[in-house]
Image (cartoon, rainbow, N blue to C red):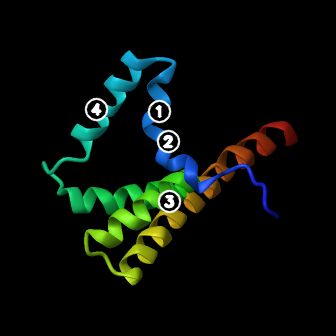
Amino acid sequence: MSNHYYNAEDLGKFGNIGAYQKEMADKFFGWYGEVFKDSALSAKEKSLIALAVAHAVQCPYCIDAYSSDAYEKGYSEAQMMEAVHVASAIKGGAVLVHGVQMMNKVKEIAM
């Protein structure tokens, strides 16, 4: 399949999102840059967090970007995969805990 919805080349065009709304894009990129600076957490730690979140929100562009970034910042494949498993466990748990809502509703309508 040669055509698909996500094109890896589009990640390189991310900076162009300001074409239709420069002021908002500038604010976003300024904030984004501040978020990923060393502070209470290191830029390296933030990269691994971003990799896990990228998987949880299932953004292929973010997965590509933060797989490269985390690897370049010195994380091993095993560490990166463990972060993916953490994200998966949290997302899976979130799905399951919402089962309580279903159980409550079924109890309500079954009465």
Q: Amino acid at mark 2?
A: Lys
Reading the image, the residue beneath label 4 is: 31
Q: Are marks 2 and 1 in contact (CB under 8 Å)?
A: yes
Reading the image, the residue beneath label 2 is: 13
Which of discs 4 and 1 lies nearer the camera? The answer is 1
Indicate left or right for 40 with 26 as reference. left
Instruction: Give the alpha-carbon distance from disc 2 to disc 1, as whole Å.
Output: 5 Å
Query: Which quadrant of the rendered structure holds the N terminus?
Result: bottom right
Q: Amino acid at mark 3?
A: Ile
**Which residue is located at x 48 percent, y 69 percent?**
84
In this picture, is 110 found above or below 16?
A: below
Q: Amino acid at mark 4?
A: Trp
Reading the image, the residue beneath label 1 is: 16
Instruction: Give the alpha-carbon distance from disc 3 to disc 1, as whole Å.
Output: 19 Å
Which of discs 3 and 1 lies nearer the camera? The answer is 1
Position of residue 86 measured from the top left corner of the image (x, y, whole percent): 45, 68
**Which residue is located at x 52 percent, y 66 percent?**
89
**Please, what secondary structure does the residue beneath circle 1 have?**
helix
User: Quick one: label 3 or label 1, which is nearer the N terminus?
Assistant: 1
**Please, what secondary structure does the residue beneath circle 4 have?**
helix
User: Badge 4: few (under 14), some or many (20 or more) residues near its Cα, within 10 Å?
Assistant: few
Rendered image: mark on residue 99: none
Query: Which quadrant of the rendered structure holds the C terminus?
Result: top right
Position of residue 73 measured from the top left corner of the image (x, y, whole percent): 26, 68
Report the front residue among 76 and 26: 26
In this picture, is 21 found above or below 92?
A: above
Reading the image, the residue beneath label 3 is: 63
**Which residue is located at x 64 percent, y 52 percent?**
7
